[in-house]
Image (cartoon, helix red, strand yellow):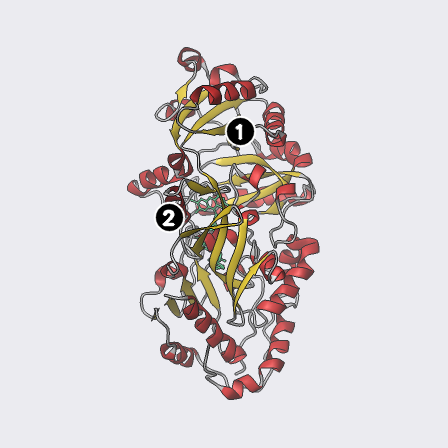
């Protein structure tokens, strides 16, 4: 599959791997030189990349965009961007860097849609592999043993996967709130949304993967084949391999959804209802929620897309700046099933204790519901408010601590929600596979709390990056001090000791998998978990 470029380097590879690994697992990033191999400068790195014979292309000049992301908080420009056309292109690229080993500076970051928040898909001075270029083998539905799956390239956007599967009346079961993210990007984290309480995160809905490991080998993996790699890659933050293809479980797609929002002022009632709903067998198909702090016009904003069930009552509702908790639910249905779905909704709603005058409802095609955030994106794009810094904070909070968290954070640390939505909804741990690399709190039920802020680039603005980051730090400090047992989702840490604490009992396995699948720590440098040893000079 490849031609050795430097046979003399290969001679040293085994020793070199051992040396590199010792640096990977040191508590702090390790800088020591080791073997007397000739140092290859970035210029010679470039020369090797120029010699790389691939179906796609290697870009050296137009590389700046690959050094940024949706977060707009970190910038690190790569040396080159590889645009692969085939899996072999990805494998050849990784294999080249693997063979060069410690004699080169190069690392490799797979980049999906670049919607990371803290530079996770970046590779400073290294290679960014633009996964969206890899279109082969296209998106196709496969049927096997009575089940249906969709196969898609790792760089495919979820919106494209949805549009293609809908042609056959099918759709994946588990989603993210936003669909302009890639299959490989969300599977490297977890992929959570309001369906996850029942179907688990997206990583619980994968049947098979094709992966290029950090050694440049192409591996097929699943529950039955190369299972350790399969579980490692799911939620693996891009550390063990590059997902080039995924086979994802499908279900019959509904045609329409009833989309409902109701409000609470009592947090205990809100969470009691959320937890009751996610524990029921016959329940809503999607359950989320969000917090509204110190805002007045929120209900009038909804009226453009949601009708209040009782307009006269709803117009009398005044929040008086109170903190409100909005429960958001959907029920799927098909044309002709309206009466039965309405009855089912009435049955479920009768069990809830929301404020009666705050029922808002809408009926939309399934695809419009799943793609709902894109409409906001288009609007924000037109106002120049999409390409701004996003100092987001995503946390998993155990159920037993969510009340303490809410008491201390909502209204005290976070005094209004005007900087962006604050999501809060419970998830069932039983739907997560403990063998994957994803990290969740200990308890059976935990909450996703997501502070999805947009910041101003002006340092003077109240919502400056600095001010919002300081709020985030206060929330994190509170979690640490009060022993909430929180785990970060889309985690970001600067030093390895923090990563060890994040992974807890899973760290040993995570480090072992790194040693097995990416022994030179070539992949995923932007996560800052492991560091490739520096070249000898
Ligand atoms: P990138 O940012 O390009 O990459 C993310 C990480 O995965 C990097 O470390 C990268 O190196 C690695 N990676 C990328 N592709 C591959 C691959 N093929 N193989 C191996 N590693 C790879 N997340 C949720 O769970 N639920 C949500 O509802 C949700 N909503 C979001 C809404 C918006 C507007 C945004 C910006 C993000 C949202 N996210 C959500 C977070 C999102 O899932 C992550 O940021 C995800 O990493 C972005 O996907 P991406 O394709 O842009 O990946």
Circles 2 and 1: CB atoms closer than 8 Å:
no
Q: Is residue 280 above or below residue 435?
A: above
Measured from the top left, where is residue 374 in percent x and y? 37, 40
Q: Is residue 24 above or below residue 44?
A: above
Residue found farthest to the front: 145
Measured from the top left, where is residue 224 in percent x and y? 61, 58
Measured from the top left, where is residue 512 in percent x and y? 66, 65
- The residue lying at 52 percent from left, 40 percent from top is 450
Count residues near mark 1 (Cα–Cα under 10 Å), then give few for <14, some for 14-19, many for 20+.
many
- The residue lying at 49 percent from left, 53 percent from top is 247
According to the image, label 1 marks what residue? 284
Q: Is residue 497 above or below residue 150?
A: below
Secondary structure of the residue carrying numbered label 1: loop
Residue 160 is marked as 2
Secondary structure of the residue carrying numbered label 2: helix
Task: Respond yes or no on whether mark 2 lies under 8 Å from ligand 1.
Answer: no
- Left or right, residue 261 beside residue 300: right
Residue found farthest to the bottom: 8
Between 15 and 529, the residue placed more toward the observer is 15
- The residue lying at 44 percent from left, 42 percent from top is 171
Q: Is residue 505 above or below residue 530?
A: above
- The residue lying at 59 percent from left, 28 percent from top is 277
Measured from the top left, where is residue 18 in percent x and y? 64, 77
Residue 458 visible in rendering: no
Dot 2 or dot 1: first in sequence order is 2
């Amino acid at each position: 599959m490849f031609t050795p470029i430097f046979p003399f380097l290969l001679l040293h590879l085994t020793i070199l791997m051992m040396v590199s690994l010792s640096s990977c697992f040191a508590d702090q990033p390790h800088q020591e030189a080791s073997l007397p191999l000739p140092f290859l400068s970035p210029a010679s790195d470039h020369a090797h990349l120029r010699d790389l014979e691939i179906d796609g292309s290697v870009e050296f000049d137009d590389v700046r965009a690959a050094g940024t992301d949706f977060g707009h908080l970190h910038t690190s420009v790569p040396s080159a961007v590889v645009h692969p056309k085939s899996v072999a292109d990805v494998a050849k690229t990784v294999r080249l860097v693997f063979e060069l080993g410690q004699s080169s500076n190069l690392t490799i970051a797979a980049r999906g849609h670049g919607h990371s928040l803290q530079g996770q898909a970046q590779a400073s001075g290294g290679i960014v592999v633009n996964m969206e270029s890899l279109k082969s083998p296209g998106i196709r539905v496969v049927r096997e043993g009575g089940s249906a799956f969709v196969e898609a390239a790792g760089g495919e956007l979820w919106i494209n996967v949805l549009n293609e599967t809908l042609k056959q009346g099918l759709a994946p079961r588990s989603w993210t709130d936003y669909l302009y993210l890639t299959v490989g990007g969300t599977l490297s984290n977890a992929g959570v949304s309001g369906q996850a309480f029942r179907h688990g995160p997206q990583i619980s809905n994968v049947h098979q993967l094709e992966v290029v490991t950090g050694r440049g080998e192409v591996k097929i993996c699943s529950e039955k084949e190369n299972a350790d790699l399969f579980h490692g890659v799911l939620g693996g933050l891009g550390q063990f391999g590059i997902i080039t293809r995924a086979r994802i479980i499908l279900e019959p797609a509904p045609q329409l959804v009833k989309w409902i929002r109701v409000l609470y002022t009592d947090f205990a009632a809100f969470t009691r209802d959320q937890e009751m709903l996610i524990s029921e067998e016959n329940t809503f198909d999607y359950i989320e929620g969000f917090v509204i702090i110190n805002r007045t016009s929120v209900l009038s904003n909804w009226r453009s897309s949601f009708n209040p069930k009782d307009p006269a009552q709803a117009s009398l509702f005044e929040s008086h700046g109170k903190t409100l908790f909005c429960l958001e639910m959907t029920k799927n249905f098909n044309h002709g099933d309206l009466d039965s779905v309405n009855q089912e909704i009435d049955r479920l709603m009768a069990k809830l204790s929301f404020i009666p005058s705050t029922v808002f409802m809408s009926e939309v095609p399934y695809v419009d519901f799943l793609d709902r955030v894109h409409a906001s994106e288009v609007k924000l794009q037109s106002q120049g408010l999409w390409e701004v810094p996003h100092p987001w904070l995503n946390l998993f909070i155990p159920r037993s601590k969510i009340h303490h968290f809410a008491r201390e954070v909502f209204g005290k640390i976070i005094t209004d929600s005007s900087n962006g939505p604050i999501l809060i909804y419970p998830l069932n741990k039983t739907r997560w596979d403990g063998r994957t690399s994803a990290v969740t709190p200990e308890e059976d039920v935990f909450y996703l709390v997501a502070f999805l802020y947009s910041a101003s680039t002006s340092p003077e603005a109240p919502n400056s990056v600095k001010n919002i980051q300081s709020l985030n730090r206060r929330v994190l400090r509170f979690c640490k001090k009060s022993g909430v047992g929180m785990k970060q989702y889309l985690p970001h840490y600067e030093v390895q000791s923090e990563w060890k604490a994040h992974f807890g009992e899973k760290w040993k396995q995570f480090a072992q998998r790194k040693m097995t699948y990416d022994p030179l720590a070539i992949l995923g440098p932007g996560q800052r978990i492991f560091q490739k040893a520096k070249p000898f000079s």
